[in-house]
Image (spheres, coloured by chain):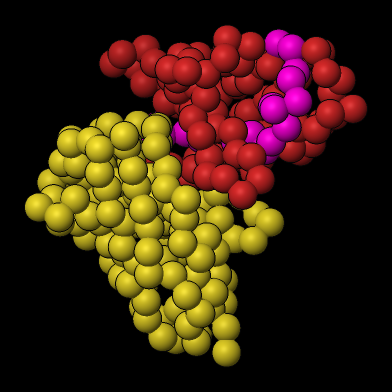
Chain colours: A red, B yellow
């Protein structure tokens, strides 16, 4: 199975500041036939199901604010929140869907400093 | 409006069985693969099982293989998870989620149904 490792486990950022979450996969999730990375990012707020923010590592889901962006390729990926808002307090997960079983990172909790 | 509604959770004794259901509406059900993902209390996300649009491809996590069975009925826009030989470690909130394709992200999730395995 592909192991997804996120860092840090938690971070506290001031309102309006940048938040950066890293995700590393134990093997490449770059699908060579279409040159896309099978990597998604989810946001989960307390008492709610996860919501997809980013897929193919850098494609923003419809309706997701443009302060959320994804980058990276192969085994190393980053989710950036360019200007943290109060409503962004949540746990964020990365997921690889390159192979079965699809696997998730352990989650990163984002709080306001 | 897309809706995915899970049901069937509850308190069950170890070793017993439970069947979860997921009713979908607001989209063309047989265009999508469907999945079950669980989240133990205070923990992260664990994919449990997935089924392709025509049931031709089915997968399970090692932790449930041989005990859980996923199925779908496209005529009823529903997917099911039969859970046998339940263990305490199966206690979790079980989410139903859809993906457009077998190998794709999960673009819509239900609210989940809670399964508690305890004597």
B95 up-or-down from A59: above or below: below
Q: Give left or right: position of B30 versus B109.
A: left
Q: Which residues are magenta?
A: A82-99
- Please indicate whether residue B19 sits to the left or right of residue A103 in the image: left
Q: Nearer the viewer, residue A36 or B3?
A: B3
The N terminus of chain B: image quadrant: top left
Q: Quadrant of the C terminus of chain B?
A: bottom right
The residue under the point 76% across, 25% down is A86
Residue A27 visible in this rendered orientation of the protein: no
Q: Identify the image quadrant of residue B18.
A: bottom left
Residue B116 found in image quarter: bottom right
In the image, residue A8 lies at what x, y percent?
A: 77, 32
Q: Position of residue B3 (x, y in %)?
A: 33, 43
Outermost right residue: A113
Task: Indicate left or right for A11 with B66 as reference.
Answer: right
The vertical placement of A34 against A53, above or below, is: above
């Amino acid at each position: 199975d592909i192991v997804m490792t996120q860092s840090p486990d938690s971070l506290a950022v001031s309102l309006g500041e940048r938040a950066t979450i890293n995700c590393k996969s134990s093997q490449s999730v770059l699908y060579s036939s279409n040159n896309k990375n099978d990597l998604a990012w989810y946001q989960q707020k307390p008492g709610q199901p996860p919501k997809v923010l980013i897929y193919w590592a850098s494609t923003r889901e419809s309706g997701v604010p443009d302060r959320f962006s994804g980058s990276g390729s192969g085994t190393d990926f980053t989710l950036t929140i360019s200007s943290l808002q109060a409503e962004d307090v949540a746990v964020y997960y990365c997921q690889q869907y390159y192979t079965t079983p699809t696997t998730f990172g352990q989650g990163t909790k984002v709080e306001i400093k | 409006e897309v809706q995915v509604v899970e049901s069937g959770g509850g308190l069950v004794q170890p070793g017993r069985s439970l069947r979860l259901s997921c009713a979908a509406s607001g989209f063309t059900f047989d265009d999508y693969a469907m999945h079950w993902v669980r989240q133990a209390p205070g923990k992260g996300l664990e994919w449990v099982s997935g089924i392709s649009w025509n049931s031709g491809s089915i997968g399970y996590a090692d932790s449930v293989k041989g005990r859980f069975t996923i199925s779908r009925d496209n005529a009823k826009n529903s997917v099911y998870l039969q859970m046998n030989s339940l263990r305490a470690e199966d206690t979790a909130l079980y989410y139903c989620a859809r993906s457009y394709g077998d190998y794709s992200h999960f673009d819509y999730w239900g609210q989940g149904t809670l399964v508690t395995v305890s004597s």
